[in-house]
Image: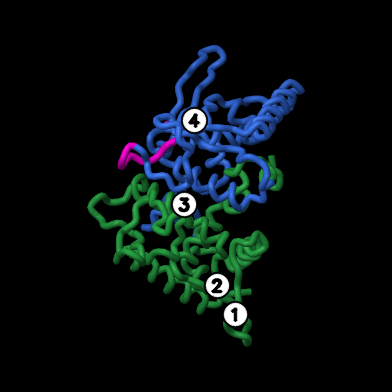
Chain colours: A blue, B green
Amino acid sequence: MRWDDIGFSLCPIARSLAVVGDRWTLLILRELGMGMHRFEEVQAQTGMSSHLLSTRLKRLKAEGVIEWHLYSAKPARYEYAATTKGKELDAVLLALQAWGQKWGDFDPQAEPSLTWVLKETGQQIGPFLKSPSGDKPFTFDDATPVISAAFQAEREARRLAFLAFRRDGRGGRK
Amino acid sequence: MRWDDIGFSLCPIARSLAVVGDRWTLLILRELGMGMHRFEEVQAQTGMSSHLLSTRLKRLKAEGVIEWHLYSAKPARYEYAATTKGKELDAVLLALQAWGQKWGDFDPQAEPSLTWVLKETGQQIGPFLKSPSGDKPFTFDDATPVISAAFQAEREARRLAFLAFRRDGRGGRK
């Protein structure tokens, strides 16, 4: 079975996987959920080549999962954001986060790398949260990410490595 | 960034994706959750080649996500099941299912292809269920799948196509 086919299955899990069933796509959505909206920011944190990231962003736009707008005309630069359809995948990311925190071989003494605090109540959210606003699905719009110092350092190191990579002329946007 | 690397990130989402971040893996876990436990059953419903399925099963066993036991000695045949670690990924599948049901371009008149009814209460479960047993994460062990007639027909057609494929000697387990 090819992935072109599986999107036509009656299984809702298969239909979701036909859209988001690769690691890169979910990492892109993680970055958008964490407030990164520019091409280079997402590239730095995911480690994707600019070609691969560009391809995935186009596909996600075609699927209606993200949208973008121009923030600089010369050179042309875009900001990317999840649509409502895309934001409702945050429940998937939250479930992956909870599972990874439990089963990802973390140092049990370390504080969690990433948690989310509800904007409305200040409450830290667990993996199986019922949306506070009733029937509306949970999205990261409802919450603020809390990033541990160690994970923050990892992200900063990744950002600096990406800048150095670009400065050396081996990377950058095509 | 290679996927060998990303499993070492402090991000719990990245650690989860390093284990389950491909479509095939999550489809295998869907089948185990739906009560399919034999190699050919999983192969028929996922459309994977026997080589690919075999490779993925071995990796999932090495990750502690599934286990297997012999049910026939001659020829050697195994039954596969999710471990506790694997079952706790059911929350990810449930979130994918909810999203796919909403955004997967289904006929709005059709009944949902797949829902789950809690064994304990008979209640149909929504996407953001808090486990009925308190802090225990939700797994499909707690529920019975309800498959629409149309999705059941799709699965049966897939099973028959697989049997025909095998009979013609172009498939089968290596």
Q: SS for tag 3?
A: helix
* Residue at mark 4: A144
* Amino acid on which disc 4 is placed: Thr
The residues bearing labels 2 and 1 have C-alpha atoms spaced at a distance of 8 Å
* Residue at mark 3: A4
Residue extending furthest right? A168
Residue A56 visible at all: no
Q: Chain of mark 1?
A: B
Residue A138 magenta: yes
Q: Quadrant of residue B83?
A: bottom right
* Residue at mark 2: B39
The residues bearing labels 1 and 4 have C-alpha atoms spaced at a distance of 49 Å
Residue extending furthest bottom? B74
Counting from the top left corner in percent of width and height, residue B112 is at 30, 56
Q: Which mark is residue B9?
A: none
The residues bearing labels 3 and 1 have C-alpha atoms spaced at a distance of 31 Å
Verify CB contact (< 8 Å) between mark 4 and mark 3. Answer: no
* Residue at mark 1: B77
Counting from the top left corner in percent of width and height, residue A166 is at 71, 24
Q: SS for tag 1?
A: strand
Q: Earlier in the sequence, mark 4 or mark 3?
A: 3
* Amino acid on which disc 3 is placed: Asp
Disc number lying in front (3 or 1) = 1
Q: Residue sitting at 27 percent across and 51 percent down?
A: B107
Range shown magenta:
A133-141
Q: SS for tag 4?
A: strand
Disc number lying in front (3 or 2) = 2
